[in-house]
Image (cartoon, rainbow, N blue to C red):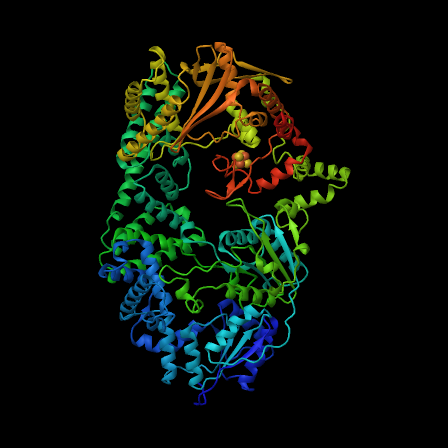
Amino acid sequence: MASDGGERAISWEWVAPGAAAHHRLGEVVDELKAGDPLVAVSVVVPANPAGVWARRAMGARRAGVVGVAFGTLAELAAELAADRLDAEQSVPLADQELLALVRGELERTDGAFHSVRHHASTQRVVADAIAAFRRVPDLTAELDGPDLAGRSLRSLARQVLAIGERISSRAGFHDDVDELVIAAEEVTGGRAPALGSVVVFLPEWLGAHERALLVALAGAGVEVRVLAALTGDRRADGVIMSLAEKLGVVPPSPPGDTPAVDAEVIEAADPETEVRHAVAWLVDRHRNGVPWDELALGYTATVPYARLVEHILDEAGVPWNGPSTTTLASTSVGRLVAAMLRLIDGDLARRDVIAALGCLAPPRREWPLSSWDRLSRRAGVVGGIEQWRERLDGEVVAALADADIDGIPEDDRGRHRARAERARALRYLVDQLAMMVEPLRDPGSWSAAVDTVRGWLSELEPSLLRSPDEQKAVAALGTALLRLAGLDALEPEPRTASIREALSAELDRRVGRHGRIGHGLLAGPLPALAGAAPRAVALVGLSEGLAPRRLRPGAVLGNAECAGREADLGLDTELLQLRRFRCVVGAASDAVLLLAPAVDPRSARRLTPSRWLSDDRTGTGVDRTDRTIVPSLWADAARRTPLTRAELTHAALARRSADPRALSAWLAADHLESAREILAGRRRGLSVWSGLVGPHDALDTTGKVHSITAFEQYAKCPTKYLYGHVLGVRREDEPEAVEGLDPRSRGELVHLILQRWLEERIDRDGELHLEILEQVMNAEFDAWEETRAVGSVEVWHRDRQDVAVRLSGLVELEEGSGAEWMPHAAEMEFGENDSLRVETPGGAIRFKGRIDRVDRRADGALRVVDYKVRGSGKNRSSVDVVGVRRGEALQLPLYGRAAAASLGGAMVRAEYWESASGQARAFGVDLGDVDDAFTAAVGDIAEAIGAGVFPLQPGEETPWPRSSFANCRYCEFDSVCPSQRAEHAEAAAVDPAAEPVTRRFAAAVGPVRES
Ligand code: SF4
């Protein structure tokens, strides 16, 4: 090691991030070389991309980079410690090996972890805590001190430390901390190889062992110079000041004010709009002469940005480099292994079997995946090899019997035989899959498990593995399997769950990197941009929660224990994040674009722009009023640089739409007549894209018979009516494992019991007769159990009790509702042959339905009752004249009319009797009070349906049980509707085209409420 033998002080210098820092680095290297190009200098960078930027900047100088090595401090330590570690035959301790050692230690250790030692999360927590503790050498002493809060936490931490010490004392393995410690010892002992002077370039933070290595280097006479970035933000720079202090350096006073960054800030509709806008902005810069490798795109969160960035950059044909989102699990080999593991976990669950078959070979005529899927659904297969065999055999018998029916056409006979063949083939394949996964149920050793997995891979159809990416994945999985097979030396008797966890963890690892570092635009999370000096940078995902992210200490050390040593423990504190943001923004020499999403499309939750955008101290200097708002993806696409052919067409349309004649000619020439309608439709407000369908034969409400709940659904959300009752969209049921009565089945069972009980009572004298209810209930339970899937014995027992409780709630309601009412009819149908008509200005609207119960009083008055055991979604205050006029409470008035029309009666009362979640209640309306409002609401809804007006109506935002909207929480179309449904609804509400919808609400809050 080149040194003058005497101890030196570490020197410290402030630099501005970006090109200025690179310029100063060149000057410092020249000073250190003092005119001799062969003098060695090591430049320590925060990350490898930073090394490439620095090397490139230095290479552009006349002096070049002869004798200058670039690398991270971990790489430098590995180099300094290599000789000794080689001599000790020590190999790096990888994650799976650490977990195997942790499992072994937990098995041998009593204490807090013992009862949960087999949980993968326990093993993960302990492994992570060991890794964190090893970074803080003084923690052991402090655990005995008085300051550490919480006795139980202290005891946990001690147990982890003890496990960690036993693991690190095992010969043959070393981790990165060992490398740093050994490197420092070798340097101090004068045994390290020569490395010349060291420049620590733009450090983000240095842990205790890293600091110790630098101190050791300086102590051994190596010239160590730190070039630290100054952002101008006092809080952010305070972090790096404390690093200087920990290194024993007194940094010079920072130079004067750092200029505020001139950044453009955009609040975009959602993450996709953000990324598309950012890429278009960067493409513009490239077209204006900036090379791709002087541009950068950063994001604050891997999900959802990494995939979006990868997809949109590739779609736009931008050459780029950065972390890849590809994991082994997303390749053919990985998908197969994951699918086979699921077969074991789910005991050959139907959908897992179909997925595994889909992974083995692509669907085609001889591999009819979708036919097998339909066939297994129809056969009612849920899972388990016995059920597969029994039900597919039954399918074969049934299909052959169908084929043997006398007199059927030959074509049909052929179809039935083909069905039998498909069922036979599927049965054979399921048997094969069962045999393939069997050895992994209890493999006994890591190598046996690995052999089984290799056997699966040999069954893959070769055509799936031809692409270079798939070949890379095969190689990566092969390496991972080799490592796992080697775990037998550390864990000779692994648990099956540990093997499956380890395999799953390997599948989740990212494979490789996109592009070569330094080639093309740099894209990645903010830490990947550290040390870069682009001319322009765009950052996406600047919303609260992501920028900054909340600090999450581990389970073993709490906030109090971490206080003051967060950075040393490897935690990304808010100040470290702020500093990184400021450095990345300050490094761009020409332009900065900062983007924040308005909505999280996964939860449809509105997001708040990051405090970093509005905090003056960040120096971004952008007032809220100066921000650009981009309300939607297509609004954005119309005014920025198009990235794809579709966007190009869209932009051209938007440009020409000002001149209708030129537009028409252009469209006709390109056969794009319908595109104009699309453009016009994408206007803000109610359009064909947001529910303005317009009149159509299928929407003629007078020509068919309706259910009143469909009208109520329209009143709640017209789009829901459009999807469910006009387009016939519905979720496909799957015969998967029954876990108990679903809400619909529970309601059906309660209704069945009450119907039988009421019929019995009506046949006798109408009295309550609770003993008959008991008999009816038991008989119906038994019949249900015989004919329906009821799940496990315990679950069925619980469900029976739950039904009995709900029934007793309804009986209590009846007891309290007056003895003068006697049951008169149960499950009374109406409108089947001669539909019930509601005369409206637009014509007669016909309804049919079924009333749960009709009671009569001695004076002839009628009462209709509708049982609700799932919660009606209504309440006393919504079932009144206003609720009826709004169209949201139409069921009771219609039932009242139907009963009166069929039975005659002086007065009709209509009530819900609700017995849900342990509480029973009754509420309803007198028909006379709401009849006019009912007719008006039915008329308005029929007119709006006929006019083809179906706006989205999600209702109020609801934070619980998840962030959603009142009408969407349990709606089966929640995953179909746009994430910006609230904005669509707001815009539609003020659009004159929505008048048929809004009229009801205006009428309900106006004259009716006053009356
Ligand atoms: S998810 Fe919401 S907005 Fe969409 S149809 Fe359902 S209720 Fe309407």
Q: In the rendered image of this protein, does residue 763 appear above or below residue 398?
A: above
Q: Position of residue 329 (x, y in %)?
A: 40, 50
Q: Where in the figure is residue 250, as x and y percent of width and height?
A: 52, 81
**Towards the viewer: 688 or 914:** 914
Picture quarter containing residue 949?
Answer: top right
The image quarter in which residue 348 lies: top left
Can the viewer see residue 706 in this picture? no
Q: Nearer the viewer, residue 990 or 298?
A: 990
Q: Quadrant of the C terminus?
A: top right
Question: Picture coordinates of residue 274 (x, y %)?
Answer: 59, 52
Pinpoint residue 420: horizontal percent, then vertical percent: 33, 27
Task: Give the quadrant of the N terminus.
Answer: bottom left
Confirm whether residue 208 shows in the render.
yes
Relative to residue 962, is residue 6 depicted above or below? Answer: below
What is the number of callouts on the image?
0
Is 792 situated left or right of 872 in this image?
left
Q: Is residue 528 left or right of residue 207?
A: right
Image point (36%, 23%), residue name? 811
Q: Quadrant of residue 669?
A: top right
Residue drawn at point x = 33 percent, y = 35 percent: 739
